[in-house]
């Protein structure tokens, strides 16, 4: 019986805070919030993109899903919530590929040994079958068998990232988190790695959370996209709707359809002073950078659908949500 969940990843109301010790001599430590009530679902076989500028909390969400940091709220992978007891099962279900392949690889371990390692850790197969699977994986990620007995330093950056992708897939995870996995590579090599993700995803059965600061890259690869700003999801939709008809001024800024305005400019434009800035803490996080801000934005908007209730004929999978009082529809 197939008892697998249709939802591979369910993130509900996840908030993460860390203790900020403050910079001044007398400053007291306070809790700083990185993720603010984040909810999202990734379906089986889906590639889901998470995009936003540096420091918005993307990797923090990835780390929470990997069970590496504490958080409030719930995260389920294939219906299972992380706990100390199911740690091994959980790490088998979720694997990650990071930005820097060199630091992810053990410099003294051959490529084949690197690929075999997850099987060994989880007690899967025999010496022979592990070697065989490693060779098959090399082929899948586009490296020939001669790489098996080489060391990471003998490979290029792109080839190393191919090895990291292979290592993540060796134990057939349900979910792969790729966190800026192409960002450190040359543009053309990064494009090859994006194509590799696409090819492998077509051939294997896994869902992916693809994290990047680059909306164009995310659009190229992903089925659905969420845009994060200061730890909140401000817009989410199927890739076509979100990319071709962005509703949130921040998403449009990422696509350069809206001019970036300096925080200081915006604060004087809206007659802001620091105390009012504080009082807007409950409001939209983007208020002080937004060219379209109005008084309404002093309250935090909900994430609401901007599509008609019936799915469109052209795109039955269509979904599109925005957290904005003044979405720039048809602007
Ligand atoms: N334990 C911690 N101590 C100090 N700062 C933290 C801690 N955890 C998270 N942060 C801060 O939280 C913010 C979000 O970090 P995160 O790495 O998730 O961002 P990101 O969106 O992945 O950025 P990038 O695109 O640069 O990778 C950053 O400002 C980071 O400095
Ligand atoms: Mg990051």
Image (cartoon, helix red, strand yellow):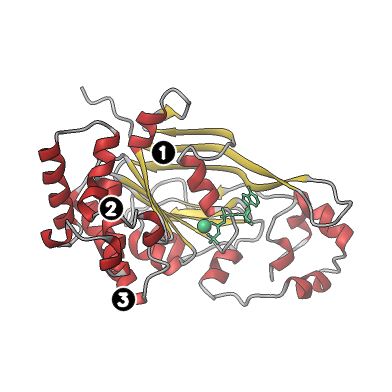
Q: Alpha-carbon distance for marks 3 and 2?
A: 28 Å
Tell me whether the residue at label 3 lies in contact with that at label 1, contact meaning CB atoms closer than 8 angstroms.
no
- What residue did someone put label 2 on? 109
- In the figure, 153 relative to 79: above or below? below
Quarter for ligand 1?
Answer: bottom right
Q: Is residue 220 left or right of residue 258?
A: left
Q: Alpha-carbon distance for marks 1 and 2?
A: 32 Å
Q: Secondary structure at mark 1?
A: strand
**Residue 41 showing in the rendered view:** yes
Dividing the picture into quadrants, the one containing residue 127 is: top left
Q: Alpha-carbon distance for marks 3 and 1?
A: 31 Å
- What residue did someone put label 3 on? 188
**Camera-nearest label, 1 or 2:** 2
Residue located at (30% from left, 40% from top): 173
Precedes in sequence: disc 3 or disc 1: 1
- What residue did someone put label 1 on? 9
Q: Is residue 274 left or right of residue 235?
A: right
Crowd class of label 3 (few under 14; some 14 to 19; many from 20; radius 10 Å): few
The answer to whether the residue bearing label 1 lies less than 8 angstroms from the nearest atom of ligand 1 is no
Dividing the picture into quadrants, the one containing residue 5 is: top left
């Amino acid at each position: 019986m197939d008892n697998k969940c249709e939802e591979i990843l369910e993130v509900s109301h996840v908030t993460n805070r860390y203790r900020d010790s403050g910079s001044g001599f007398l400053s007291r430590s306070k809790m700083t919030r990185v993720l603010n009530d984040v909810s999202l679902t990734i379906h089986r076989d889906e590639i889901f993109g998470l995009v936003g500028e540096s420091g918005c909390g993307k990797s923090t969400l990835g780390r929470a899903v990997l069970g590496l940091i504490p958080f409030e709220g719930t995260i389920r992978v294939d219906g299972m919530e992380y706990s100390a007891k199911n740690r091994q099962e959980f790490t088998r279900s979720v694997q990650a590929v990071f930005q820097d392949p060199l630091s992810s690889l053990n410099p003294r371990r051959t490529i084949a040994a690197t690929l075999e390692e997850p099987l060994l850790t989880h007690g899967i197969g025999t010496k022979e079958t592990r070697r065989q699977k490693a060779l098959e994986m090399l082929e899948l990620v586009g490296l020939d068998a001669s790489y098996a007995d080489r060391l990471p330093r003998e490979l290029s950056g792109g080839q190393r990232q191919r090895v990291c992708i292979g290592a993540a897939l060796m134990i057939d995870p349900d979910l792969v988190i790729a966190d800026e996995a192409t960002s450190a590579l040359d543009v053309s090599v990064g494009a090859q790695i994006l194509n590799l993700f696409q090819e492998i995803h077509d051939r294997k059965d896994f869902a992916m959370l693809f994290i990047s600061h680059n909306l164009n890259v995310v659009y190229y690869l992903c089925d659905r996209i969420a845009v994060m700003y200061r730890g909140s999801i401000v817009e989410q939709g199927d890739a076509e709707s979100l990319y071709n008809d962005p509703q949130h001024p921040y998403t449009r800024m990422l696509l350069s359809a809206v001019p970036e305005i300096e925080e200081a400019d915006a604060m004087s434009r809206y007659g802001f002073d620091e105390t009012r800035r504080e009082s807007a803490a409950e409001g939209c996080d983007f208020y002080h950078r937004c060219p379209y801000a109005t008084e309404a934005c002093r309250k935090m908007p909900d994430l609401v659908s901007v599509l008609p209730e019936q799915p469109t004929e052209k795109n039955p999978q269509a979904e599109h949500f925005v957290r904005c009082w003044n979405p720039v529809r048809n602007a």
